[in-house]
Image: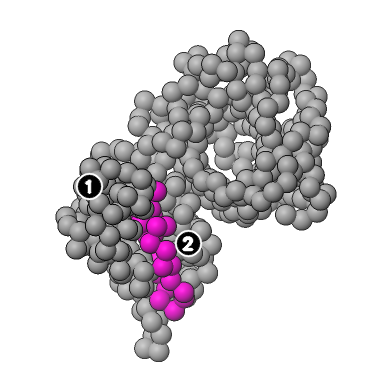
């Protein structure tokens, strides 16, 4: 992050307003965790939500310089709620305050009616990170934190944010994150919002942690009704988040043919042979475009996938390969409700050989990926269990789940898959 991170001057922005899932990169956060009187915390929630017993929540400001919905800045506050923990143990969060700069404010309002136009400004001087923010033209929150010293820790996981949409219905939005976490202490905290506002009512009993987060990659998934099982949607955004870090080209195409997500890698690969800039997938070769779009439609109607499709680039160059992978929407069983990930591989670029990351992209949890990597590399289940501190029974049970997710049936197939990843990438 630079010494000063000024608020963007939007002027007459012509930025498109994409639908989730989408990704933000190189983000910086100033976060302060707080404890509130539980009755106060409960009063900030809509009917149907219950505050965490300890009345926990907090405040944060961040900048998002890169990504399809960026650049923008935000000032936010939240209350932890029961019943929406993710698989990694992260508490569900209800955003009581959401001040976003445009165009994200307009984009977010559809699923979060509390979203307002606002901003944050972050500055860094040595070990001190300072921020201020609020609605446009006003400062409602000021904070300064100081690094506690020591090295940062790489942290990754998933949060479920619970929000009220513009129709008054509760929704949950899965957000995958990966960042460098630097613990800090609070030097200054001022909440000067009007006492009648949600932020003004959030007077903490104590501030019990603070952190600076750097180089964050965040993927925001599509909002889902809270009655739906969000675990599949949470895993989907985790996979998309990994793609940015592993340099794989990725495009997600929705049922109507629109591009819902793409990362920087695929933008760099795109040229005269295929394009994503119009919001729809377009190929210079009409037959190739018809083949890709036909395969997407076939998969969304419940059909099986195919082998990678080659995009020729002339006799003197190696082709680009496009692999369609069906993504369901939050565990939806009905065909046509999902979207299709196009995993793009340029054989002229260095390929990812990290089996752990690649196996997670293919649908395994981090624990399953570690087991698959060891067993696929030739370790017997008993030895893999010893190395991981598990029982052999646990490893063998996990292997059945791994085989099911990868569409294989035996250890020899897993070995071939891991060898292929290590040799040429996915």
Q: Is residue 377 magenta?
A: no
What whole-number distance in Å separates the C-alpha atoms at marks 1 and 2?
28 Å
Point out the stretch of residues depicted in magenta. 339-366
The answer to whether residue 346 is left or right of residue 186 is left
Up the image or down, 164 lies above or below 311; here it is above
Residue 405 visible in the displayed image: no
Q: Secondary structure at mark 2?
A: helix
Pointer 1: residues within 10 angstroms few (<14), some, or many (20+)?
some
Considering every residue shown, the one lying at the far left of the view is 409
Residue nearest the viewer, comparing 259 with 321:
321
Quadrant in the picture for residue 314: bottom left
Residue located at (37% from left, 78% from top): 319
Pointer 2: residues within 10 angstroms few (<14), some, or many (20+)?
some
**Residue 396, labelled with which disc?**
1
Give the x, y percent position of residue 425: 38, 69
Asked if marks 1 and 2 touch (Cβ < 8 Å), the reply is no
Residue located at (64% from left, 13% from top): 37
Up the image or down, 358 lies above or below 209; here it is below
Give the x, y percent position of residue 216: 60, 50
Give the x, y percent position of residue 311: 36, 74
Residue located at (66% from left, 51% from top): 151
- Where is the C terminus found, in terms of image quarters? bottom left
Residue receiving disc 2: 246
Quadrant in the picture for residue 45: top right
Q: Is residue 358 magenta?
A: yes
């Amino acid at each position: 992050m630079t010494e000063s991170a000024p608020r963007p001057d939007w002027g007459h922005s012509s930025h498109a307003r994409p639908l989730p899932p989408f990704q933000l990169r190189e983000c910086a956060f100033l976060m302060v965790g707080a404890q509130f009187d539980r009755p106060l915390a409960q009063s900030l929630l809509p009917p149907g939500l219950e505050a965490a017993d300890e009345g926990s929540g907090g405040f944060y400001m961040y900048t998002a310089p890169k990504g399809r919905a960026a650049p923008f800045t935000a000032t936010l506050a939240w209350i932890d709620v029961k019943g929406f923990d993710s698989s990694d143990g992260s508490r569900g969060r209800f955003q009581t305050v959401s001040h976003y700069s445009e165009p994200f404010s307009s984009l977010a309002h559809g699923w979060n009616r509390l979203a307002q136009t606002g901003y944050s400004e972050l500055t860094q001087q040595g070990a001190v990170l300072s921020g201020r923010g609020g609605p446009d033209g006003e400062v409602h929150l000021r904070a300064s934190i100081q690094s506690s010293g020591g090295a940062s820790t790489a942290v990754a996981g998933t949060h479920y944010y619970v929000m009220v949409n513009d129709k008054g219905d509760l929704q949950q939005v899965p957000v995958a994150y990966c960042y460098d976490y630097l613990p800090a202490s609070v030097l200054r905290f001022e909440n000067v919002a009007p006492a009648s506002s949600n932020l003004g009512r959030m007077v903490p009993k104590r501030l019990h942690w603070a952190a600076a987060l750097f180089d964050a990659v965040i993927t925001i998934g599509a909002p889902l009704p809270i009655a739906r099982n969000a675990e599949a949607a949470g895993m989907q955004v985790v996979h998309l988040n990994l793609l940015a870090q592993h340099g794989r080209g990725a495009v997600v195409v929705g049922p109507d043919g629109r591009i819902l997500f793409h990362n920087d890698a695929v933008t760099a690969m795109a040229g005269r042979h295929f394009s994503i800039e119009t919001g729809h997938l377009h190929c210079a070769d009409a037959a190739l475009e018809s083949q890709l779009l036909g395969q997407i439609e076939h998969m969304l109607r419940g059909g099986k996938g195919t082998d990678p499709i080659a995009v020729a680039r002339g006799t003197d160059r190696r082709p680009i390969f496009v692999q369609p992978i069906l993504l369901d929407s939050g565990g939806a069983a009905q065909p046509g409700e999902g979207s299709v990930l196009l995993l793009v591989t340029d054989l002229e670029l260095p390929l990812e050989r990290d089996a752990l990351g690649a196996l997670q992209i293919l649908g395994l949890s981090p624990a399953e990926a570690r087991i698959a990597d060891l067993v696929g590399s030739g370790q017997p289940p008993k030895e893999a269990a010893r190395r991981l501190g598990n029982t052999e029974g646990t490893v063998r049970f996990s292997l059945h789940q791994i085989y099911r997710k990868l569409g294989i049936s035996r250890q020899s197939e897993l070995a071939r898959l891991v060898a292929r990843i290590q040799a040429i990438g996915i």
